[in-house]
Image: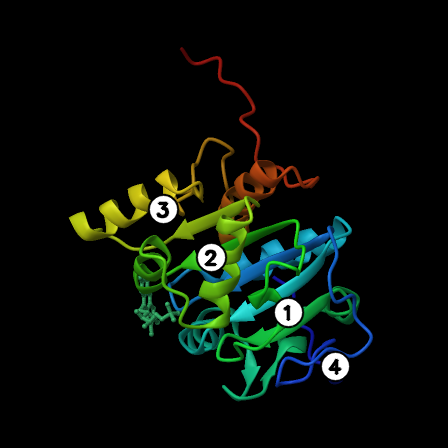
Amino acid sequence: MSRPNSGAPTPTADRAGRHGDSPVESARTLIVGVTGASGTPYAVRLVECAVRAGRHVDLIVTAAGRLVLADEAGMTGTPEEPDLASLWPHDILAGVTYRPAETLSAPPASGSFRAEAAVVIPCSMNTLAALSHGLAQNLLQRAAQVALKEGRPLVVVPREMPVTPIDLENMARLAGAGAVVMPAMPGFYHHPRSVGDVVDFVVAKVLDRLGIAHDLDVRWPGCDLL
Ligand SMILES: Cc1cc2nc3c(=O)[nH]c(=O)nc-3n(C[C@H](O)[C@H](O)[C@H](O)COP(=O)(O)O)c2cc1C
């Protein structure tokens, strides 16, 4: 994972979620929601791959998500003003609009913001419960709800272990409502040699499901042992 330490980021929205000169709506915009579940390196890698694949990423992060990004992915700055340059180099940041989830009055809260798809990665059991019950208590939940109601792809990547019957019911409810539920369950048949390889397995599955091109090397190489 890249952790550049030079210079200040130039996110294309200010902390209130207002836009500068970034695209306000685009069919090539991917909404990436990050919650306070473990697994934030998945989100860091997904954003990088999506931008490299030509997407603009609308990045929505909950308060708990910012804590876990700091803890797991090494994000610096403050909860109010995270330093995204600690997660991505400038060429990636140029394709990212950051919005704190507390900012409800931002374009992704509306169906008229025509994002290509929305991904919640990692998804906490808290946000899973909200989404499966039609709640939209912050911008992340609202953007996911909008994707569902507008018939756009919504990919949810829950992370918890073990899960309760409540969590399982919530996943089933959400899948029944049209979301693609992809629990973070990395495989090992690509013979990972690093944590990054394990992360790439999950990210590649998400990108494949969205039809976004990537060159992550996670395919099953075949097996002649049997
Ligand atoms: C370090 C850390 C790791 C956590 N990991 C998980 C997790 O894997 N799954 C989960 O459902 N909640 C996890 N939590 C708890 C959530 O952060 C908590 O439920 C929070 O309220 C989620 O809020 P959000 O859904 O608005 O992001 C974790 C919390 C911390 C501090």
Badge 3 element = helix
| Badge 1: residue crowd in 10 Å (few <14, some 14–19, many ≥20) | some
Coloration of the structure image = rainbow
> Label 1, on which residue?
107
Q: Earlier in the sequence, mark 4 or mark 3?
A: 4
Badge 2 element = helix
Q: Earlier in the sequence, mark 2 or mark 1?
A: 1
Please report contact status of discs 4 and 1: CB closer than 8 Å, yes or no.
no
**Which residue occupies the extreme right position in the image?**
21
* Residue 185 drawn at (x, y percent): 38, 43
> Label 2, on which residue?
145
Q: Amino acid at mark 1?
A: Pro
* Residue lying at 31% horizontally and 64% vertically, measured from the top left: 126
| Quadrant of the drawing holding the N terminus | bottom right
Q: Earlier in the sequence, mark 2 or mark 3?
A: 2
Give the distance between the C-alpha atoms of the residues marked 3 and 1, in whole angstroms: 23 Å
Camera sees residue 207: yes
* Nearer-the-camera pick, 192 or 138: 138
In the image, residue 100 above or below residue 46: below
Q: Amino acid at mark 2?
A: Gln
